Amino acid sequence: MRSTVRQHTSRALGRRAKQSRKDRLDMSASTARRSISSAQLTIDSSMPADMPGCPSEMPAKESLSFGKVFSPHMLRCRYAKEGGGWQSPEIVPFQDVALSPAASSLHYGMQCFEGMKAYKTLDDEDDIRLFRPDMNMRRLKDSMTRLAMPGADFDPQELIDCVGKLVRLDKDWIPAGEGYSMYLRPTVVSTHPYLGLSCPDDLLLYVISGPVGPYYTTGFEPVRLTADTEYVRAWPGGIGASKVGGNYAATMKPGAEANRAGYQQILWLFGEDREVTEVGSMNVFFMLEREDGSGRELVT
């Protein structure tokens, strides 16, 4: 049976996502040159060379560790100012990325990424779902804009269509069962090959993927959190709302300290009132009893 890849979206976003292909392509020639086009996607389905973390077959799902096993193919698309913008996207065997040692992504943190998932439904393993990819694309565009990266005006549906073809190609690497999925990591890095603080002229957008189960070694058991009052994860005017590499580098030291104390993650606080901002690698929800006794409220 032929597999399909579907998108889960909110109702309002779903209506916007149904914009016809004709409408999406009805743009000026200059805008079209800047856009990512799924119609130009090429696919090399050959298997990769021997690469760390990329076995010839998917391991047993019970043995999976997050981020340690990768699917055999990746999507990539380059942005080149001198080339007129986004170039033709391509799916290629999983491979290393070549960068100039002067690339601004290595020196100035010019990189951003997303975390997406593809699932097989429990009642039909040929029915594959992407969970709210439109929201991932929105945040990726916002992160690129915050980093002053060019090309942030790409058509998100065109990139989603490319990701869907990558998922279909490697669908056998989606583990079945509740709690298991294929993790997808869209990433944009500056390949601008010069030193000096300036907006990049060249980018590489790529998407790698891999089968995953529970994120923590404790499996699906609850995790322990510690409320940190010494370090700050995000603050007004900063980049906490963007998914950029610099947000995570600063959490490594306090995260290691929390791990040594027996906690899996940090509940990040901010300000004199110790207001909750987030938990590093997950969503956090609170069930509050209303002061007037009128019931409970779920706060996300």
Image (tube, rainbow, N blue to C red):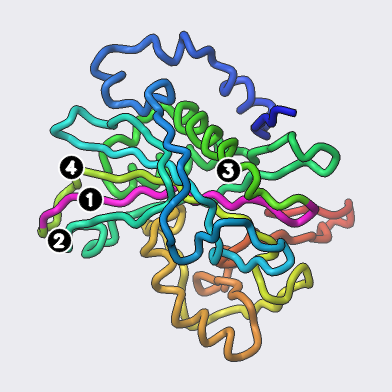
**Span of residues in magenta:** 177-194
Answer yes or no: do the residues labelled 4 and 2 have beta carbons within 8 Å? no
Helix, strand or loop for disc 1: loop
Q: CA distance from mark 3 to mark 2?
A: 34 Å
Q: CA distance from mark 3 to mark 4?
A: 32 Å
Q: CA distance from mark 2 to mark 1?
A: 9 Å
Residue that badge 1 annotates:
191
Would you call the spot at circle 4 few (<14 residues within 10 Å), some (14-19), or many (20 or more)? some
**Closer to the camera in the image, 24 or 182:** 182
Frontmost of labels 4 and 2 is 2
Frontmost of labels 3 and 4 is 3
Helix, strand or loop for disc 2: loop
Answer yes or no: do the residues labelled 3 and 1 have beta carbons within 8 Å? no
**Closer to the camera in the image, 99 or 26:** 99
Which callout, 3 or 1, points at the residue further toward the start of the chain?
Answer: 3
The numbered disc on residue 242 is none
Frontmost of labels 1 and 4 is 1
Position above or below: 294 against 78: below
Answer left or right for 287 relative to 151: right
Residue that badge 3 annotates:
170
The numbered disc on residue 201 is 4
Which callout, 3 or 4, points at the residue further toward the start of the chain?
Answer: 3
Circle 2: residue type: Ala
Q: CA distance from mark 4 to mark 2?
A: 13 Å
Task: State the count of labels.
Answer: 4
Q: Position of residue 156 (x, y in %)?
A: 46, 30
Circle 3: residue type: Asp
Question: If the image is split into quadrants, where does the C terminus sit?
Answer: bottom right
Position above or below: 181 against 88: below
Residue that badge 2 annotates:
102
